[in-house]
Image (cartoon, rainbow, N blue to C red):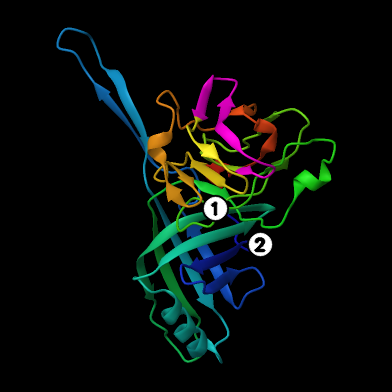
Amino acid sequence: METAYLLLTFVRNDGRQLQMGCGCPIKVAKISGIESPDYSVHTASSAVEPGSYVAGKKVEEREISVTFGVDDWQNRELYRAQIVSFFNPTKSYTLRLNWCYKQVQIGCELQGFKFSEIESMWGILEGKLDLLCPYPYWSDLDNFGKNIAAITAQWAWPVSFAALKSTHHEAGKIYGFKTFKNEVNLPNKGDVPTGIVIQFTAARGAVKNPKITKLSTGEYLRVIVDMQKGDILTIDTNKGRKGVRLNGEVISRKLDKLSTYFSIDGSDNIIQYDADENYTNLDVYLYYQSKYLGV
C-alpha cells in the first residue's frame, strides 16, 4: 500500500486519540494485515467415501502491523514520550483508516510495541506496533448527526440508521429512510451480513406486540409486550449483543418463540414493521453498519 496518503487515527477506550500518517509529524512507513484476513476450511471424511467434505469455514482474527517514524529530530523525545504514554497494553483501541476516499475502522488490542535503536542524535525515531483484532471485519466510521430521513421527506415512517458506540466492532454509519408505507429496503454495501438494532418508540400512544419482519426471508422479531406512550423497545441482533430491552430493562424472555435474530445481507433487504394493535403510533429507528473483509 502507498502510505503517502494514508491517515491512521487510534482512538483509545478512554477517549484519547493519536494520529499517524498524511499531514502528521508521525509518519507511517509500512502497514500490513489490512487486506482480507486469514481463514480456515475444516473438512471431515468418511471411512468408505473418497476424499472429504467441507464441515465448516471460519474467518480468523486479524493481525495488523504498523511501522512508523518521526523525522523531527529536535522534538523526537517529545513525540516518543507521547507515543509511549498513549499505547498502554491495559487499554483497548479502535483503529480508523482513511486512504484514497476509503474510511473504515476496526477494534484492536495492543499485542506488541517497541522503538528501534537510534544510531545518532540526528537519526529518525522509528517504531513498530503489533495489533490483534479479535473481530476481523472492518466497518464504516461513525457518522453522527446525518439525518437522511429529513432529506427524503416524501417518505413517512422514521427509520434512522445511526452510529452505535462500541469497543471493538459495533459502531456504524448512518443510513436513514422514511416511507408512507410501513416497509423499507435496507442496502448493505458490505462484504458480509451484519446485525441491526431496532428501536420501537411508542411516540403517539399505546402499542401492542410490535413486530418487524425481513420480507425476503420471512424471518421476524415480535415482542409480546404492551407499550405505553413514551416507551422505548430495543432489539439488538448483533453477534455478542443479542437481546431485547424495554426502557433499558432486559425482557428477552418476552420474544415470540418463533422469532429469529436476523441479519441483513446482499443489496435488497425489505424490512416491514407492524403490531397487533396501533402500529401507527410507532416510530421505528434501525441502526446498522456495513462490514468489510479488507481494505
Q: Percent position (x, y) of residue 120?
A: 45, 89
The image quadrant that residue 158 belongs to is top right
Q: Residues within 10 Å of mark 1 (few under 14, many from 20)?
A: many
At x 40% / y 25%, what residue is drawn? 257
Question: Looking at the image, which residue sits at the far top?
Answer: 48
Task: Give me the C-alpha separation between circle 2 and circle 1.
Answer: 24 Å
Query: Is 113 in the magenta?
Result: no
Mark 2 lies on residue: 5
In the picture, the disc for residue 132 is none
- The vertical placement of 149 against 266, above or below, is below
Magenta stretch bounds: 201-221
Q: Secondary structure at mark 1?
A: loop
In the picture, the disc for residue 171 is 1
Q: Nearer the viewer, residue 108 or 117?
A: 108
At x 47% / y 46%, what residue is drawn? 245
> Nearer the N terminus, badge 2 or badge 1?
2
The answer to whether residue 117 is visible is yes
Query: Do the residues under discs 2 and 1 have CB atoms within 8 angstroms?
Result: no
Amino acid at pointer 1:
Ala
- The vertical placement of 244 against 42, above or below, is below
At x 45% / y 55%, what residue is drawn? 168
Q: Image check: 54 left or right of 283?
A: left
Amino acid at pointer 2:
Tyr
The answer to whether residue 286 is visible is no
Q: Image check: 164 left or right of 270?
A: left
Q: Nearer the viewer, residue 197 or 40?
A: 197
Question: Looking at the image, which residue sits at the far right?
Answer: 154
